[in-house]
Amino acid sequence: MMRFVTRRTISAAIVVVGVVTVIFVLSRMIGDPVTLMIQPGMTQADIDELRRFWKLDRPIIEQFGIFLGSVLTGDFGLSIWQNTSAFGLVMQALPATLLLTTSALGLAVIVALVLGSIAALYQRSVADRLITAFTLIGQSVPSFWLALMLILIFATNLRLFPTGGFGSARHLVLPAIALGLFPLARLTRLVRSGLVEVLAQDYIRTARSKGLSQGVILVRHCLRNIAISLVTVVAVDFGYLMGGAVVTETIFAWPGLGRLMIQAIEHRDYPVMQAGSFIVAISVVVSSLLADLTYAVINPKVRYD
Amino acid sequence: MTKAPLMAAVAIALGGVGAGYRLRRLNISVILSAAFLILLTVAAIFAPLVAPYNPMISDIMSNMLPPMSEGEPGAARYIFGTDVIGRDVFSGVIYGSRVSLTVAVAAVLGAGIIGTVLGLAAGYIRGAFDEVVMRLVDVQLAFPFIVLAIMLMYIMGPGLWNIVLALVIAKWPIYARVARAEAMSIATSDFVMAARSMGAGHMRIMFRHILPNALSPLAVVAAFAVPQMIVLEAALSFLGLGIPPEMVSWGSMLAAGRVALEQAWWVATFPGLAIMAAVLSINILVEALRIKLGASVADR
């Protein structure tokens, strides 16, 4: 077990180094940030000074070395656009994004468990068909269009929720639904197909013949078995949501990481872009690492020796 | 004012219920999906003949006309209305299908070919090459797609083939993973041994013996990827990073509609419905195909 944890952690660390390299290469390809900082009346000497100040005059390998070193200390330099710590800006925006993604994912998991259970317990019923139809449609709606339609119906017309912004729980409802519908639909399908499989097992028949109630069988025998496989899927979905949040946040003016990164790209603010994509990639790597470890711990069938 | 999108939603919901009802037989929903896709493809190919207006030409005198408005005397109706600067939304939806279908098919083919070749080679050769490819896959998958694509699009600038390239770069790993797994299991089978003992070269074994046997799971992955690509292209164009302004795409139409959401709901509604209908039909067809193939391939 220890060996599995170590091996898995080391490979996650290798991925992180790869991620840092990709971010460095990509952000240098985006363009020379100094050209954006030039103000009217600057002389060539001023420009060279700027270049020296941002260490952009050094050889590219040395720049990469500096970058790698600073990443390890969480120092991505100053934001070119806002002139404060890039890492600080990202960390300020992160809680809003985490709030949005965890709400969307929480909503998806809870509703999927309920709908998936209903569909599996009453196979081929009207409810099952409606739920299946819902999962098909839910997986076909682009989240950004859903966001616009939610705003149109529930914000501008019915005036139940604000069109965007941040602050109260009411601000969270529409973005969470827009972001959560796709994983919700997918998870519902997985819960349903997982349950259908489990319900056909011998031990369920045994549990039934013991006279256990439907509810006890569902929670104690079925859902616990499915929970194991759901852990991995939910971790993957978390990564998907961190990406999907970019568009959702932009539409709802949600002050999170995604919106910050779009703004950073518009301003060619590469320190913020680097810090932002670093944090996003790290959260994806960490969540999949945690999922694998959890999976190894809670699944008695898995033995890593 | 909310009636039309609600009614459209109800119509789609009913269609979906029909789909849910009969997903396991060859049925109405599969036939409807196929018909819709054929219609869409034909409309995309013959867009200049089918579309009543040029979707790029604005007519400020007839801007923000609601759906089914009368055009100028002798001209066609504005079935889906007009946008803020008086462009016909219906014609835009027809022309937009060109971009969506081209990008989706090209990106799936590109990513599929690159990923398959790398994955096959990794699973067959193993060793250091395998290690390098799989690490690349891991790194790539650590970036949520949209973040990576946004950076790539920003570097390359808007453009149809740039979108395709960004999607290929971002999406090859999934094929590499599937192809590698298949190659690893097929490489140990008896017929590969037999081929090798008869003196077949590595290339021949990889492409003549392993590849054909790995094709059906790869085909299912590729088919499921087509609707994803449609949505991702629309997302990039929606953010203004995809299609250049002189072209019309469903995503850029949504962006235009977003600005006038309150005054003209139809501008954002119809392109979105088009995306959804295309994605839903492909999903229904692929689901039917998957059941038919009996391929045990995961959802993504």
Image (cartoon, rainbow, N blue to C red):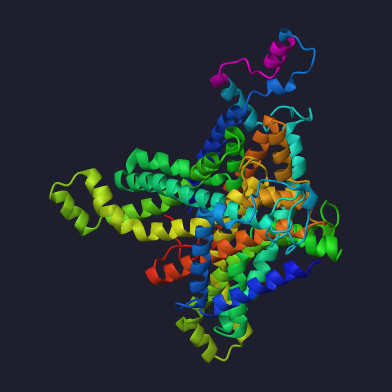
Return the x and y of residue A218 as percentages of the image width and height.
Answer: 59, 80
Residue A219 at least partly seen: no
**A45 left or right of B170?**
right
Looking at the picture, does residue A86 appear above or below residue A293?
above
Please, what is the dominant secondary structure of the magenta stretch? helix
Q: Where is residue B130? Give x, y as percent.
A: 37, 43
Q: Is residue A26 left or right of residue B106?
A: right
Q: Is residue A20 magenta?
A: no
Say left or right for B212 vs B113. Answer: left
Within the image, what quadrant is residue B262 found in?
Answer: bottom right
At horizontal 71% and vertical 50% (from top left) the residue drawn is B87
Between A12 and A138, which is closer to the camera in this rendering?
A138
Left of B57 or right of it: where is B120?
A: left
Q: Position of residue A268 (x, y in %)?
A: 69, 30
Identity of the residue drawn at 59% across and 27% down: A28
Q: Residue at x 67, y 35 (%)?
A: A273
Query: Can you see residue A139?
Result: yes
Residue at 58% of width from left, 49% of height from top?
B233
Extreme residue in the front direction: B74
Is A51 part of what is drawn in magenta? yes
Q: Looking at the image, which residue sits at the far left?
A: B198
Relative depth, front residue between B95 and A254 = B95
Q: What quarter of the picture does the C terminus of chain A occupy?
A: bottom left
- Quadrant hosting residue A188: bottom right
Q: Is residue B272 above or below residue B132?
A: below
Relative to A246, say whether B293 is above or below. below
In this orientation, which residue lies closer to the viewer: A287 or B190?
Answer: B190
Question: Start and end of the magenta stretch?
Answer: A46-62
Percent position (x, y) of residue B269? 71, 60
